[in-house]
Image: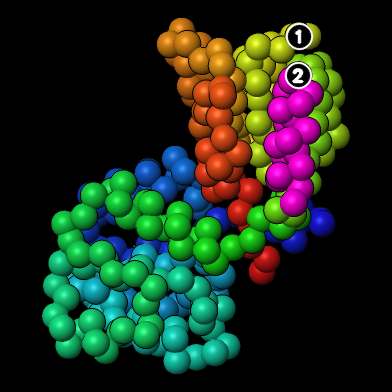
């Protein structure tokens, strides 16, 4: 699959509380979402007409317009790029009549005040259900062959393309040849170390995977190590781990959407 055909996870945030919007944007970006923020109904409708998103987060009560009308406008027009895009309705002013009128138009309702973590998890869940991982690719750096074969088989059964290597040098060589959706890195390797690979790739802006998400999967995850690499990785699982634990860590990064 051509990587140019794949879009990153994109969220349209319709929220007129500036401080809340700023917090949400920072949190969603930390989870590798692209966020477009608008504060009025008219701008929201225009954005939804012109851009495909993977999730819409809409406040009901806006200073300029009505969030409910934004949702209705999108859902009544089958040619709208976001006609079937998941919608989260987030507001502190939701009556029974309002909820009834939007019952079949939204995927989830969250009442204000809500936690930033709660909303972020809701976005991730809806995107996961709406998206696909088929055709995504992973660079897997692991020198325990039995474990590597098991993980590789499980991921490939889900439609993920897995490139498995045993050493840090081999991983860096492969990283220069193609872009991956995610990299899974063991730290304690027989040849080289995972943390050296991580630092090397993050210091190579010409590398196609300079900004690719990295999940550390290792038994060697000490506090000094975390302090050293925490700015360069997006997640970690400790050995022995289950395929389910690993999959949940990497899924936000391997879930992709076609335009």
Nearest the viewer among 106 and 79 is 106
* Residue beneath the point at 66% across and 55% down: 133
Specify whether residue 36 is in view: no
Quadrant in which the C terminus appears: bottom right
Give, as a single range, the part of the protein colored magenta.
Answer: 138-157
The reply to whether the C-beta atoms of the residues labelled 1 and 2 are less than 8 Å apart is yes
Residue 42 location in percent, x, y? Answer: 36, 78
* Residue beneath the point at 26% across and 89% down: 101
Compared with 116, 216 (above or below) is above
Specify whether residue 237 is in view: yes
Residue 2 vs residue 46: left or right?
A: right
Is-magenta flag for residue 202? no
Residue 142 location in percent, x, y? Answer: 73, 23
Identify the residue position indicated by label 1 in the image. 190
| Labels 1 and 2: the sequence-earlier one | 2
Residue 158 vs residue 213: left or right?
A: right
Dominant SS type (magenta): helix
Q: Residues within 10 Å of mark 1 (few under 14, many from 20)?
A: few
What label does residue 218 carry, if any? none
What label does residue 143 carry, if any? 2
Compared with 56, 46 (above or below) is below
Nearest the viewer among 106 and 143 is 143
Quadrant in which the N terminus appears: bottom right
Q: How is the image coloured?
A: rainbow
In three-dimensional space, the C-alpha distance between marks 1 and 2, rounded to whole angstroms, equals: 7 Å
């Amino acid at each position: 699959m051509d990587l140019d055909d794949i879009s990153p996870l994109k969220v349209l945030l319709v929220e007129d509380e500036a401080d809340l919007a700023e917090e949400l944007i920072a949190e969603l970006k930390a989870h590798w979402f692209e966020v477009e923020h608008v504060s009025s109904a008219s701008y929201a409708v225009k954005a939804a007409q012109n851009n495909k998103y993977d999730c819409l987060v809409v406040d009901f009560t806006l200073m300029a317009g009505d969030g409910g009308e934004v949702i209705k406008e999108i859902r009544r027009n089958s040619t709208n790029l976001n006609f079937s895009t998941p919608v989260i309705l987030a507001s502190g002013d939701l009556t029974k009549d309002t909820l009834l009128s939007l019952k079949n138009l939204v995927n989830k309702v969250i009442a204000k005040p809500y936690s930033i973590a709660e909303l972020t998890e809701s976005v991730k869940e809806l995107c996961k259900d709406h998206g696909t991982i088929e055709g995504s690719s992973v660079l897997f750096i692991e020198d325990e062959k039995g474990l590597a074969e098991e993980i590789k088989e499980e991921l490939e059964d889900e439609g993920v393309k897995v490139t498995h290597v045993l050493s840090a040098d081999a991983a860096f060589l492969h990283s220069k040849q193609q872009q991956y959706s995610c990299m899974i890195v063991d730290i304690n390797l027989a040849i080289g170390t995972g943390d050296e690979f991580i630092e090397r790739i993050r210091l190579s802006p010409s590398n196609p995977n300079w900004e690719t998400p990295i999940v550390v999967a290792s038994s060697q995850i000490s506090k000094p190590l975390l302090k050293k690499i925490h700015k360069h990785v997006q997640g970690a699982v400790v050995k022995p781990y289950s395929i389910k634990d690993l999959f949940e860590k990497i899924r936000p990064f391997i879930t992709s959407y076609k335009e």
